[in-house]
Amino acid sequence: VQPVESGGGLVQAGGSLRLSCIVSGSIFSMLHMAWYRQAPGDERELVASITNAGRTNYAESVKGRFTISRDNAKNAMYLQMNSLKSEDTAVYYCRGGATWGQGTQVTVSS
């Protein structure tokens, strides 16, 4: 089942956004989940990941600013993004197992 992202938008530099990803079905708790992003002209890159055991991993560029979390009871994964920078502007994608969402646009104005 395809993940569905929400929560993107336009924010000023220094602001915050919280992205959500919902994966319907009963297997969510078993999935390794991740957030990726892709800026225009760039390759898609890993932002953060969380295993089914709750272990997290972050790209160096977002460490200390972004927090990934999951709520298995809600079949949901989140990305709290603080201290946003213009270089965080991208389409953010949720990946659940091997399945990708359609993405949500995050635009940070300087």
Image (cartoon, rainbow, N blue to C red):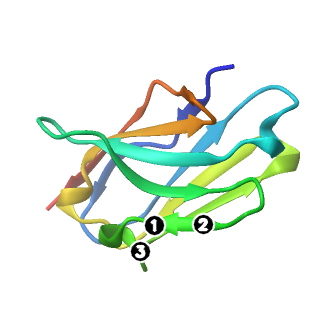
Amino acid type indicated by mark 1: Tyr
Along the line of sight, the residue nearer the viewer: 96 or 5:
96
Find disc 1 in the rendering and name its residue: 58
Amino acid type indicated by mark 3: Arg
Residue 52, position in %: x, y? 75, 53
Along the line of sight, the residue nearer the viewer: 28 or 106:
28
Residue 104 is drawn in which quadrant? top left
Placement of 34 over or under 54, stated as above or below? above
Tell me, yes or no, whether the two marked residues, 1 and 2, touch with CB atoms within 8 Å: yes
Question: Of the numbered discs in the image, which one, if any, rests on residue 85?
Answer: none
Q: Secondary structure at mark 1?
A: strand
Find disc 2 in the rendering and name its residue: 56
Amino acid type indicated by mark 2: Thr
Within 10 Å of disc 2 (Cα), the crowding (few <14, some 14-19, many 20+) is: some
Placement of 3 over or under 50, stated as above or below? above
Residue farthest toward the top in the current orientation of the protein: 1
Q: Earlier in the sequence, mark 2 or mark 3?
A: 2
Observer-side mark, 3 or 1, equals 1
Along the line of sight, the residue nearer the viewer: 109 or 30:
30
Residue 45, position in %: x, y? 32, 47
Observer-side mark, 2 or 3, equals 2
Find disc 3 in the rendering and name its residue: 65
Q: Secondary structure at mark 3?
A: loop
How far apart marks 1 and 2 lie (CA) works out to: 7 Å
**Is 27 on the left-hand or right-hand side of 70?**
right
How far apart marks 2 and 3 lie (CA) works out to: 14 Å
Residue 58, position in %: x, y? 45, 66
Along the line of sight, the residue nearer the viewer: 89 or 70:
70
Name the residue rendered at 50%, 43% in the picture. Answer: 7
